[in-house]
Every structure is written in structure tokens, then in C-alpha cells.
Image (cartoon, rainbow, N blue to C red):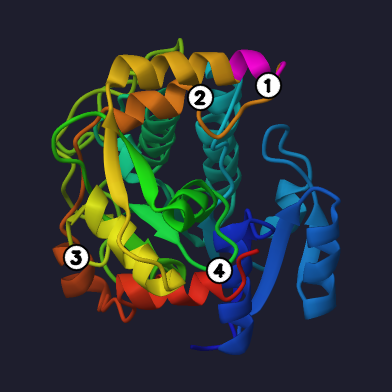
Amino acid sequence: MTAARYLVTGATGFIGGRLTRMILARGGAVTALARPSARARALLELGVQVVTGDLTTGRGLTEALRGADRVIHLAAALRARGPAGFWAVNRDGVARLVRALAAQRRPARLVLCSSLAAGPAISLYGASKRAGEQVAREYAGQVPVVIVRPGIVYGPGEEALLPALLPMIRLGVVVKAGYGPRRYGLVYVDDLCTALLAATERGPVLEPAGRGSVLRPAARGPGPRSGGTRSDTGPGLYPISDGNAYDFSDICRALARAAGCRDPLVLPVPMPAVHAVAALAELAARGAVPALNRDKAREMGHADWTCVPDAAVRELGFAPATTLTQGFEAALRTAP
């Protein structure tokens, strides 16, 4: 890697923190667009140039882009009280970024980290991520853009999967949403970061609008189906996982092994009950957004969250190096 300068949005988050340290370890320089926080101050101590700003307003964006050779966009709303909260970040934030890049004489290459949830777009989160992808496609003729769609990302510092499963694993009983098989694609955080960096350097970019692979114009109002329909393949779009399709019980057993526990008993819960509990959790949260919420319950009802990362293997040289058990062991070393 040459001493390139990367703009990383979302550098204070789980993936962004790991990515930033990886770039620095490889000799690169990082600019982070971030709100003031303890995590932003920690980035400063690492030698990161931190520009105070916010993609929901565009503040600081022009300054953050100055001198950037490559841009990796990770910032996202994972939870929101309603559709507007998702759209403000996951679609409109992308729009501000690509417009600012398009205004430059020689725009930097943009890698947009999306999600497998953008494929079926059955949740508001997934639909908003798909809408963000569409905005990027609309500017593909002016800005070189690559979209990376990871499955479930896990590893040290992750705040969703392990906190939800580990207490049940230690009890020996895990509840599962719905009956029948549930399959998932997972990727260890460092393997994803390696793929993101590879996407800044090689591989084709999205085709410009009007060449057949573009979504039809997005619906103006937010909704779980906005963003059009198309085959989720084509140049510049990379689904990412470690290449395996894990059943929910596979994940539980791997985490149990990593934690030194016996294989847990997995008990399915009917989806109507899951939706009811999610609604009650939102009421009990008094305006906050709990980890189990109605939007997340929509995703939990989907039976297949897997992907085939062949394009990334072929065009980016993606080679996941971490097994599920190894990744869980690494995550547990920092877990409470």
C-alpha cells in the first residue's frame, strides 16, 4: 500500500475503528469525519486527522475530502425511531457525500459499505441502505463507486450479535426467531476491512446510469420497498461473507465452543410472538430504540441472509482468513 490518504466516515464505530487502525498499520493516512466524542479524541491520539462534521447536515464534508485519495463510507443509522431517521443518514448522507465528490475536478474512488439487508429490502433499514446504493448509482458517471454488501459482521468490539447470544449461550438455552431453517452469511471484521481496502485499489466500478443495470428512480417517500428492483449483480457490487451458509444452530455451537460452554438447546419462538415482544420492547424503551425492535423483527423473519462472495474473490483477491470459531474466540477476549 502506498501512503494514500483515506477519508473514512464512521471511523468511530466498530468497523471504522478496526479499519482505521489497519490503514495506519499499513502506512496510510486517515481523515475521519466525526462528531465530537471520546472515540473521536482517541482517533486523534492515533494520529488521525479528525474533522468535526456530520453527514446529516454536510458540515465539515468539504474540508474532510480535501487531499483524500480514497473514500470509504461506513457511517450509517442501524436503528431509528421511524423511517425518517434511517433515510436521513443511509440515503441522504450518501447523497451529500457523492455530490461533494462529484463537484471535485478529479473525484476520489468511493467505496460504499452497504449491507446484505439492501437486497430483499424487507426492513426500513434495508430499504434505506438500498436507497443509498441507488443514489451512488445515479452519480456513477461522475464518481468512481464500488458497493460492498457484507453479511453479519462480528469481532472484537461488536455490539449486537455477541451481546444478544452470549448470555443465553452461558445459560445453555437460546431462543430462535421462527420455525424452520434460518441461514446467515458472516464475515470477521478484519476480513471485511481487507475487502474494503482492496475495493479502493482494484476491481471495476459501478456502471454509469442508463446502461441497463441501474435501478429505476427511488420513491420519494420512505418505505420498505422503495429503491426499485433489479438483479443484485454486476460490475462494482460485491456481496461479502466468509463463503459459508451458517444455520442459526451452527452459529450458536461455534460461539459455545469459543466460550468453553456445552452446545446450547435452541428453542424456536413463533414469529408473531417475536413481533409482539419487539413492539413491547419499543414501548418499554420510552423513545429509545432497543436492540430488538419491530424493524429488526422484520429481518429476523427472513429465512436466508447468505451470499456468494465469488466476485470479490475473483476481482478483489478477497480471501477470508478467519474461521467462525477463531473469530468468536478473538471477540470473546475483549467481551465483558
Name the residue type under label 3.
Gly
Nearest to the observer: residue 217 or residue 152: 152
Q: Secondary structure at mark 2?
A: loop
Which residue is located at x 55 percent, y 58 percent? 158
> How far across and down, in percent of the image, does residue 292 sit?
50, 30
Q: Earlier in the sequence, mark 4 or mark 3?
A: 4
- Residue annotated with mark 2: 293
- Mark yes or no: residue 152 visible: yes
- Residue annotated with mark 1: 285
Which residue is located at x 53 percent, y 25 percent? 87
Horizontal side, residue 136 vs residue 53: left or right: left
Q: Earlier in the sequence, mark 1 or mark 4?
A: 4
Q: Is residue 57 magenta?
A: no
Instruction: In the rendered structure, find residue 156 and report the number of the disc placed on it.
Output: 4
Please say if the residues under marks 1 and 4 sit with CB atoms less than 8 Å apart: no
> How far across and down, in percent of the image, does residue 305 sit?
24, 44
Residues packed near mark 1 inside 10 Å, few (<14), some (14 to 19) or many (20 plus): few
Q: Earlier in the sequence, mark 2 or mark 4?
A: 4
Which residue is located at x 45 percent, y 61 percent? 154
